[in-house]
Image: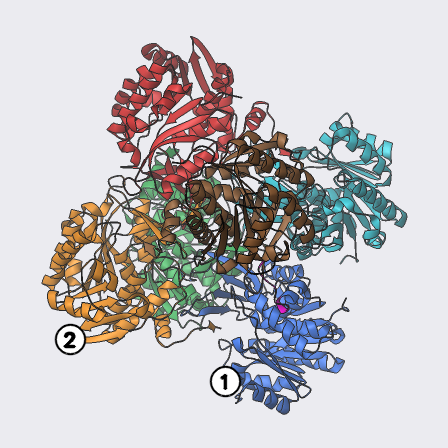
Chain colours: A cyan, B brown, C orange, D blue, E red, F green
Amino acid sequence: MVSMTDLVTFGETMLRLSPPRGERLETTGDLAVQAGGAESNVAVGAARLGADARWLSKLPDSPLGRRIVNELRSHGVRSGVAWTEPDESRLGTYYLEHGGAPRGTNVIYDRTDAAITTVSPDELPTDAVEEAEWFHTTGITPALSAAAAETTTALLKTAGDAGTTRSFDLNYRSKLWDPQTARAAYEDLFEHVDTLFVPRRDAREVLDREGDAVEIAHGLATEFAFDTVVVTRGLEGAVALHDGSMYEQDVFEADTFDAIGTGDAFVAGFIAERLRGGDLPAALQWGSATAALKRTTDGDLAVTTRAEVQSVIDGEGGINR
Amino acid sequence: MVSMTDLVTFGETMLRLSPPRGERLETTGDLAVQAGGAESNVAVGAARLGADARWLSKLPDSPLGRRIVNELRSHGVRSGVAWTEPDESRLGTYYLEHGGAPRGTNVIYDRTDAAITTVSPDELPTDAVEEAEWFHTTGITPALSAAAAETTTALLKTAGDAGTTRSFDLNYRSKLWDPQTARAAYEDLFEHVDTLFVPRRDAREVLDREGDAVEIAHGLATEFAFDTVVVTRGLEGAVALHDGSMYEQDVFEADTFDAIGTGDAFVAGFIAERLRGGDLPAALQWGSATAALKRTTDGDLAVTTRAEVQSVIDGEGGINR
Amino acid sequence: MVSMTDLVTFGETMLRLSPPRGERLETTGDLAVQAGGAESNVAVGAARLGADARWLSKLPDSPLGRRIVNELRSHGVRSGVAWTEPDESRLGTYYLEHGGAPRGTNVIYDRTDAAITTVSPDELPTDAVEEAEWFHTTGITPALSAAAAETTTALLKTAGDAGTTRSFDLNYRSKLWDPQTARAAYEDLFEHVDTLFVPRRDAREVLDREGDAVEIAHGLATEFAFDTVVVTRGLEGAVALHDGSMYEQDVFEADTFDAIGTGDAFVAGFIAERLRGGDLPAALQWGSATAALKRTTDGDLAVTTRAEVQSVIDGEGGINR
Amino acid sequence: MVSMTDLVTFGETMLRLSPPRGERLETTGDLAVQAGGAESNVAVGAARLGADARWLSKLPDSPLGRRIVNELRSHGVRSGVAWTEPDESRLGTYYLEHGGAPRGTNVIYDRTDAAITTVSPDELPTDAVEEAEWFHTTGITPALSAAAAETTTALLKTAGDAGTTRSFDLNYRSKLWDPQTARAAYEDLFEHVDTLFVPRRDAREVLDREGDAVEIAHGLATEFAFDTVVVTRGLEGAVALHDGSMYEQDVFEADTFDAIGTGDAFVAGFIAERLRGGDLPAALQWGSATAALKRTTDGDLAVTTRAEVQSVIDGEGGINR
Amino acid sequence: MVSMTDLVTFGETMLRLSPPRGERLETTGDLAVQAGGAESNVAVGAARLGADARWLSKLPDSPLGRRIVNELRSHGVRSGVAWTEPDESRLGTYYLEHGGAPRGTNVIYDRTDAAITTVSPDELPTDAVEEAEWFHTTGITPALSAAAAETTTALLKTAGDAGTTRSFDLNYRSKLWDPQTARAAYEDLFEHVDTLFVPRRDAREVLDREGDAVEIAHGLATEFAFDTVVVTRGLEGAVALHDGSMYEQDVFEADTFDAIGTGDAFVAGFIAERLRGGDLPAALQWGSATAALKRTTDGDLAVTTRAEVQSVIDGEGGINR
Amino acid sequence: MVSMTDLVTFGETMLRLSPPRGERLETTGDLAVQAGGAESNVAVGAARLGADARWLSKLPDSPLGRRIVNELRSHGVRSGVAWTEPDESRLGTYYLEHGGAPRGTNVIYDRTDAAITTVSPDELPTDAVEEAEWFHTTGITPALSAAAAETTTALLKTAGDAGTTRSFDLNYRSKLWDPQTARAAYEDLFEHVDTLFVPRRDAREVLDREGDAVEIAHGLATEFAFDTVVVTRGLEGAVALHDGSMYEQDVFEADTFDAIGTGDAFVAGFIAERLRGGDLPAALQWGSATAALKRTTDGDLAVTTRAEVQSVIDGEGGINR
């Protein structure tokens, strides 16, 4: 059994609205509703794998805001939310239309002026960050507003001062900002980060890195003094540099039902295993297996269990009856 | 057959998102999606009853914005839309949770900073207003933003200059503004209005009128020189003052499946009949019958036909086979 | 336990296609599919109440035709079907849009040239009629085509010759023929009928009868020498004339979910009880209770049980746990 | 803000499986899945109204068992569950078919040998009972098995020893046991109960009480030394005897969407208000309003808020926009 | 921006009724309803890609007939419909059961005696054909009835006389006629056709052509003096002969959600690009990309946009956020 | 046409409850309901392919029990059921969560103490077994209870005495018993079996056989004197030993929508063809084709037709219109 408050994450969670497979946003009559947000996705994934997890954010105290907290809570995640009056702020939403080659999956953000854009550290239970073993946030949050960016920095500093491990997933979103602005913001934050998660493509296109994943990891670790750099390469798997050693992890092949949240599931599996004392290779394996399981289920969240992750690592499958 | 462009309306149309009956926004997994907005509701209702109708507004050129136009178009309403780039503005949405006594029906607006809040007359096909026989808008639009309020005034003036009949439905929304602010805004617009639709309750609570519906109608007509004042009284029916004569209309009793849009359906039926040359009593009857039919069907829109409205007026019903 | 083949019915069964409550045929994206037809409704209702029932008809040997037989069979009704090649005939369909006052329920028949319109007695297992205790058909069948009318006459004659009790439900359908044509056809058949079911309204408007239900029953029994005449009066209940005695039955009040099939359920309950040896008052009571139960459930069919009917007669209800 | 662990409840929670309205268990293709159980219903209702609530029970550690805990947790209820291996026990289920007059609502229990039937006090966190302000259970639990009955007694004693207020809802279930057996079991427990909730009908038919609700309350309070006796009378409202005074509460009329859980919602509202320091009349009012709100929504649970309950008490309603 | 009435098509549009994936027509309880017909599919596809498109046909003026017009109108297609009284004709329907290897997709036509079978040119707005740049119809229409065949010929002649480009998609349907009859009918029409679309298989099996697609194109162009012949070869792509030059186009690989309408989408993309002035290779590319997009979405219609087609041509995809 | 009662099967049929694709039992709000059980799956499959089939079992006379019989009956299977009072026994259920690599499909049985566990031969119409040409049961039944095992033995003996062909499908279920116990039970039954169906994997892991499928077949036939041994090898197809000859059959490749019931469909196709007089190779081909068709449709049952199976054997497919 793990100790209290292993993991705290901070970021925006939105209402995810998606039409049935094969239907289009322009014509559908029906939207499935779920909670989705990179940082709460990580909290849920890690909580389901045994971590005591908490998520910090800001929400309107409306049925819509409460359903976010309730859905996370159903998976065991406690929330530390700065509530506004129901009509004082809005809940960010995003519309997700599943694609199918050659049609891309389309995400329409409707998150402008969401509650979190006015967040400040003093509204949040920052002591939770100090008492946690691990703090995680992503590159989406600083893109949302100046206040969100400042709060991100403040929480990372708080974590650093308290000795809490700090991880950061780049999560570049081209619909929120351009690469140059994003790069500058990221690089300001990197000094407060212990573990960086970064897709190879973003390392190249946003951080202007060159070379293969190994070279990227070395370059970033050298320049920004990260403890750990994990570079993900889509179907080619991930590499990680930690304490001067390089580790490699294949993906587990998956029948993809819903790809959204795959990266967050990877991070969740990685952190959950690190929190349990697993070494880097084990953490990569848990990350990769959790990500594969996520792909088989609907929604942003990695609704899985320790037993299922272990079963993927052990190569089991088929019909269990 | 009626002539081209009988009716032009102007206002915001939102995406309406509603859970199944008996389910709550806080817990539902499913939202039905429809287009809803007072002024397009009127355009659709009137178009389905034979009017050539057009709706003016401003929308993002996204799948969500286009579905509004498509849904109205499916009912025969042409749109005159100022399109923005997909990411330059947002589409207003509203969440509708159907109630059941003693629980009220709950509407959560998420329309702040919607595209229409930056509308200006020069973005819109104002010649359509000049060429129309009738122009209709409501008290919701001026509540949305200064720009929307100014455009409302400008279009009413344009209509007045061109000899187009102008109607205005008070449609007070307590979630958008307070009674004092609303009253001031309404009264500035009243000089540009020929026909006023007003619920008795709003006349009392927002316009500070006293007395019964007849007294209210007389008072408003006298003070603001309306051609016609229609005061609706919920289940007690409507009264109308026109050319110094007072007319009364009962409601047609209805099994209410969805009450949203009832008032707009009334206005649609009224205007459609006026445009066909019907006198005031006929227009009230068509308004009342269209409203009753609206209550029996799902969604904001009065999806009905001339034959059905006539059938209600004639007192038919039962199983038709 | 009842004996083999108590009841044979003959008529058309269609695919019933209906949108969800509150939605309209003109706009719905979804249709529920069920089997529906007056004579098979009676067979199903009676079979569920313990009768051994068989239904005779003609269908295309397509997935659509087979699903009719399968659905009836699931309720215990055996079919005696003249099958055509899949593409040689079509299955009749009907679209059902549930109304709500003041909007009527609307039925759109699409049954022209359905398979049954070319039926002839020699295609059907007429020995089943001879061996049955009871044969039932309705006034819909002769309206479908000359061949269907001739087959109706032939089967009634076959039943008469074999001593099988023959019942006939007038079931006037204004969308199929006019009252004059219908009346002539009905009256030609009446000499072959023992028990007549007739709504008071049809007795007046189609059969040109005058007076109240009792007078109608007497008049018809006298003129056409029926053993039994049952006149239904909607919410006022039914009266029956049998062997010179008059019986009266109230309706059991019901929360109506779907009114279609109520009359057929009444007939089913009546016949099922007669077949078990019940007297007229008992049969009327069973008919009325079965009809009330039908109204509470979706679809044409009286999906109920002997225990439930008994429970209605005994006045039970509430939550059973 | 209320203190930690106001309320602990103990009992079985089942998977509730119910077909769509108007469909029958015998023919439906679709079942809605929800958690339902009298004692967790009370915990959820009270938690949503501000109480810190916990529910004790026994479940298999399977996806089905976990979904019970997750659903309760989403509403803020913490669980104290004795978990068995996934295949070592089963989760109780119940099938719920909504009725409509004259057809009763039908509940089919499939709860034999459910996990809770082998529960013992030492498997449960009984310290939670000691630390709580209030402990609640119902007459369903002792009907499930000898072990469940013994655990019920033990927990009531634990609560009594610790000075925790103990309430008991008779909740007689004729499908679980007969009145005589039930009565004996109840009466053995009554000495450990402070507040008794009992429907007038059960008082008469199971407890063999005579007279009206007031007389019943007096009789029970006298005989068993209850602090408080609340007798509910269906649509006639409730009466309560407390400290020698009698209080009466009308029902709030409701459009009933789903009646299941109404009694539990009453208890939840009552306890929540008592825990906040409300007096008896206030508790009755909160109970009655919570019950009315429950009736308007789908499922066993009173998915409501303090604001909504207050709004019912204040007589508000209509469309809120 | 393109000019008014670029494209007119003529043909039958049916109600398409299809069960959910994996379910069978014989057992399903649910049918999705959509509009489908080769010629309106082309009109919708082209309209969505910027063409001003109109569709000519004949329909009953019933809710079912109107929903066809409404659905096309929602995509921007204007209709020129000869309306019959509601009960004077029927709307063709087709049942579509999606297959999965080795089970074929099954289409059951129920279109006999549909309204269009009695169509005549004088019922239709033939001036629309004269004023259009392009007229398109298919080999389905002449198979429906003698009147439909004669009207097809008449409209092609009208188009020819007016200098409107005429295209024809062979669209052989073995459930409507045999190859010999079809061939004779096609060949009578070919003299009135400028652009022929023909699948290689139909060229061989129905038109008795030999050789590969290139040889087929040459042979047909030579014999019937087509301006353009496009021969499609399923997954092998298309070839086109135009002005003596041969062009080849690969398919864009697609995750097929619904293959119905793929050929019509190809034609729509081809015509839309030709109308915008694109050359043959561009038209083939647009046809192929539109067809690929169609395959990814539910229904007959190519619900896509110019931007999406361009994105396919440019090889983009993935998750867009 | 085949003769009366070709096939009798005996075993348990459960309610199958499964969430939509991509959803998890732990979070779904919706379960599809179907009948499923190895032996009734075989009966349905064979009945749909022309055999007169009957299924023997024991059920509670509740709506749930009756729906099992009704669903089988809809496919033409007659039932010989020992009914218990509604509350005297329970219906077995199983929860099915569809997987997707690397997540396995998960089956949760909730069948303990189902009605069949108390079955005895004298409750069943054993004369049906004597009069049948073929009797089939599986290795699931003896795992359910001692009584079920004894009844299995008794029915196999009855069949043997009457000269009825007896087949047995091993169907090892690791969730019901361990390999050693299962093996002992199987081997006791083998002397009463003519045709054995066994998956290669179970032959190895449960029956402790070695070698390839051919060796396994020879070994089993030799040791237990089976007439026929069919060894299935998943995607590698099946081999059969009969009268000393070995036959091999490839699988027909299939787009798998639902793999549950594939083995039963194979058996159904095999037996149906044997009953029609087909030789071993034909039976293997029918088994394999029926299995492939089963995989394309939802549910346990092979809802197919003789024409479809023939079409698979003939290699047809595509869109049929």
Q: Are marks 1 and 2 on the same chain?
A: no
Q: Is residue F296 visible?
A: no
Quarter placement of the C terminus of chain F: top left
Q: Is residue C79 left or right of residue B275?
A: left
Coordinates of residue B253 in the picture (x, y in percent): 44, 59
Label 1 or label 2, whichever lies nearer to me, is 2
Residue E93 pos. (x, y %): 34, 39
The question of residue E248 being in magenta is answered with: no
* Chain under disc 1: D
Q: Chain of mark 2?
A: C
Mark seen at residue F218: none
Q: How many marks?
A: 2
The residue carrying pointer 1 sits among few (fewer than 14), some (14 to 19) or many (20 or more) residues within 10 Å by Cα, namely some
Magenta region: which residues?
Answer: D312-319
Residue shown at 65% from the left, 39% from the top: B148
Q: Which residue is mark 2?
A: C244
| Residue on which the image places disc 1 | D205
Near-viewer residue (A275 or D196): D196
Question: Dot 1: what SS?
Answer: helix
Mark-to-mark CA distance, 1 and 2: 47 Å
Q: Is E36 or A231 nearer to us in this picture?
A: E36
Q: Amino acid at mark 2?
A: Gly
Dot 1 amino acid type: Glu
SS label for mark 2: loop
